[in-house]
Amino acid sequence: MARDLAQEARNKALALEAFDALFNRRDFEAAESYRSPDYVQHSAGIDSAAQYEHGLIRARTLAALAAKRLRRERVGAVPCGVALDTAARR
């Protein structure tokens, strides 16, 4: 069977979008939308582990962000092309 390079590219783009939603933007609802409701996991214990990991990542991320906010630290990414003025913090 020949490789479908166009489909592989679409799959890669979709996986990167899901990764970006979960780990970079921390948009858990958007990340959840990338999971298919009819997905079948064929490895024993992986599905429950994946759900546990998703919940763990969410809880740890929210706790870390809350701690940073309490310490009045910057939360989030600096927009592309914008430089921080580190001299103002001294």
Image: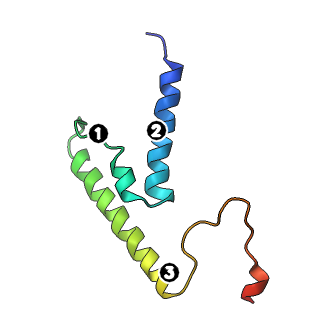
The disc labelled 2 sits on which kind of residue?
A: Leu
Q: Residue at x 73, y 73 (%)?
A: 84
* Kind of element beneath mark 2: helix
The disc labelled 3 sits on which kind of residue?
A: Lys
Mark 1 = which residue?
36
12 relative to 77 in the view: left or right: left
Name the foreground residue: 46 vs 80. 80
- Coordinates of residue 14 in the picture (x, y in percent): 46, 38
* Kind of element beneath mark 1: loop
- Coordinates of residue 26 in the picture (x, y in percent): 44, 61
Q: Badge 2: few (under 14), some or many (20 or more) residues near its Cα, within 10 Å?
A: few
Q: Residue at x 64, y 66 (%)?
A: 78
Mark 3 = which residue?
68
Mark 3–mark 1 CB contact (< 8 Å): no
In the rendered image, the vertical position of residue 90 relative to residue 29, given as above or below: below
- Coordinates of residue 18 in the picture (x, y in percent): 44, 46
- Number of numbered discs overlaid on the protein picture: 3
Q: Earlier in the sequence, mark 2 or mark 3?
A: 2
Quarter of the image where one finds residue 44: top left
Mark 2 = which residue?
14
Find the distance from the CA under tag 2 to the CA under tag 3: 30 Å
